[in-house]
Amino acid sequence: MRILSRLPSTLPAFMGVVIHRGAGSTSSWSEVLGQKTKLRVIEPGNGDPLTNGTVYVAPADCHMVFEQGTVILRTGAKEHHTRPAVDPLFSSAALAYRTRVVGVILTGGGHDGMQGLLDVTMAGGLSLVQKPSEAQDAAMPEYAIAHDHVRAALTVDEIGDALVLLARGGSVPT
């Protein structure tokens, strides 16, 4: 929520958010996250168009991918013991948007997101992680740092500021 609260309503980008949760999850993460941001936050339907200024939250029990300007929801096999997983989103975004993708890993257990960040980096995009010292569970950011080409480990506030800067054509110091 702190990252989203730092983003302006005029952000010239769209975002995908994956929260590890099971099929029985009844939490409305789009409502929770939407309370602290000026951006539109939704759980998309299959085939919804990708629109700047919108945050797309992966629905429970679906992998969310970005293809040809649309959201595709898949109920395929779990990845890293979870559905939704981060890797499908990052990998699809890297394939579709190449150098315009910024992948961000925040607190969490396991190593979901590492392969997706590698795909982002290999496509010419940028990979960022939350500083492990700040993360509630540092496993995901630490794993990404150890196995990927992470450009920078930043605080949550720094990540929010960096996303605005990058969306406007700036760069992030390493």
Image: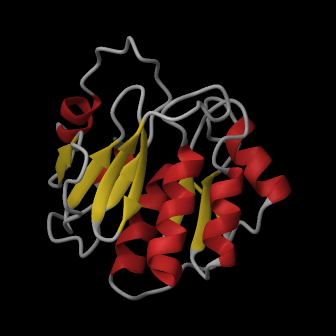
Q: Residue furthest front?
A: 76
Q: Check the image and report above or below for 2 versus 104.
A: above
Would you say 164 lies left or right of 40 here?
A: right
**What residue is rendered at 78% in x and 46% in y?**
143
Give residue 6's quadrant in the image. Answer: bottom left
The chosen color scheme is: secondary structure
Farthest-out residue, right: 146
**Whether residue 23 is visible:** yes
- Where is residue 159 shown, x and y percent of the image? 48, 60
Position of 150 with respect to 134 (left or right) is right
**Residue 44: x, y in percent?**
23, 44
On screen, residue 109 above or below 39: above
Can the viewer see residue 174?
A: no
* Closer-to-camera residue (142/157): 142
| Closest to the observer, 60 or 141 | 60
Quadrant showing the N terminus: top left
Residue at horizontal 69 percent and vertical 76 percent from the top: 122
Residue pictured at 63% horizontal, 48% vertical: 113
Question: Which quadrant of the figure contains the C terminus?
Answer: bottom right
Q: Nearer the viewer, residue 7 or 27?
A: 27
Which residue is at the far bottom? 169
Residue at the image point whose x is 34% and y is 58% from the top? 15
Position above or below: 37 against 92: above
Looking at the rendered structure, the number of numbered marks drawn on it comes to 0
- Residue 151 vertical position relative to residue 22 in the rendered view, above or below: below
In the rendered image, residue 19, in percent from the top left (x then y), is placed at 45, 34
